[in-house]
Image (cartoon, rainbow, N blue to C red):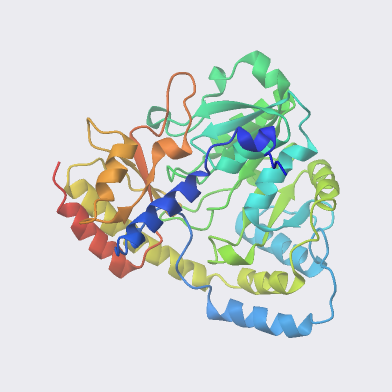
Amino acid sequence: MKIEASNRIKGFGGYAFAEVDKLIDELKGKGIDPIDFGVGDPTIPTPEFIRNAGKDAIEKRKSSGYPSYIGSLEFRNAVSKWIQKRFNVKIDPGKELCSNIGSKEAVFNFPEAFVNPGDYVIIPNPGYPPYERGTLFAEGKVHYTNLLVENNFFPVLSEIPNNIAKKAKIMWINYPNSPSGKNATKKFYKEIVDFGHDNEIIIASDEAYTELYFGEKPISILEVEKEGVVVINSLSKRSAMTGWRVGWLAGDENIISVYKKLKTNIDSGTPTFVQDAAIAAYSDEKHVEEMRKEYKEKRDILVEALTGIGLDNCSPESTIYLWQKVPDGMDSVKFAKKLLDPKTAIVSTPGEWISTTANGVNPGKNYVRFALVPSIEDTKKAAQKILDLKF
């Protein structure tokens, strides 16, 4: 029997972070245990009080049946209260909020609710791969906006062709930004909202890193506007709950109502006991403060080593990433491979793997991304290995 992949799947290369996993497996096959800064999966354990809340909830919910498609009312109330406290924005938990199975599920599926074949979706470059992949699965077209250091890693709206803007249904933005670590400003959010309103484009704001910052608190686009806007967030990074798969969308009730209709046809909702653990996570800020301190320490250790070998200071304002410019005369793949030398055995993600060439430029060509997920001890070891590098 002949088994053949769909044209959609045939058209895709490997998923960038799956390619990183392959590199790690190759090193391990040689008996080398690398220090892995490749994939942004926190190694910090989910805090004990959250785990205990999850254990208790398993018993409490032992006969609960299928979860709510859109999230339990208790969960939506908890998220609504947290948004009010954190961003001073009122969100109606019944009309303006919906749970999701982590951010990736929501990002990938979101275009299916609004994009018809041939419609455009505007996405940042570099950016989270599901922005692009979800668009293509919905038979939409992608228009990339390059995020360059000379523009403070913001998209230049005037460079988006008018004919593209008029055919676009969604524009993805991501601040605090992965991988640059740049925070958004109210001025930028106001410009984006106005652009969306002028062209009838939904502004979809991926705010997964708002709680991992090292100075001034990042803001939410919801502080500027709700009409025509949706925010996607999760507890993956805030509370080290990547494996729990729980998050939410909030914003314009007209957008949320359409998304709910889509979601009820795709999955059966986040398990209720997981939502109960998430409620506990949102009741506490101390564990988030402790995580920020740990990430800051790792950030400072690695930045000091990288600047110590003559590279640019790439210290981010937020997120768990360093977007490091590589030495002159090297590209991202060449530099990442140098770090993979068995004597060094440090895994990073070449910027070219999470960027694409648009308008003749690949914004990741001269950068590598370090995810600050190894332990402090391993980060110190990596820093020393970097200081021993010769170019």
Task: Indicate whether 318 appears above or below 170.
Answer: below
Task: Indicate whether 375 appears above or below 97.
Answer: below
- Residue plotted at (64% across, 38% down): 9
- Residue 199 in the image: x percent, y percent? 71, 23
- Residue plotted at (47% across, 25% down): 357
Residue in front for this viewpoint, 284 or 386: 386
State which quarter of the image contains the C terminus.
Answer: top left
Judge left or right: residue 390 versus residue 70: left
Judge left or right: residue 79 versus residue 299: right
Residue in front for this viewpoint, 187 or 379: 379
Q: Residue furthest front?
A: 1
- Residue 193 in the image: x percent, y percent? 66, 32
- Residue 86 in the image: x percent, y percent? 61, 59
- Residue plotted at (73% across, 74% down): 273
- Residue plotted at (60% across, 45% down): 206
Judge left or right: residue 231 versus residue 284: right
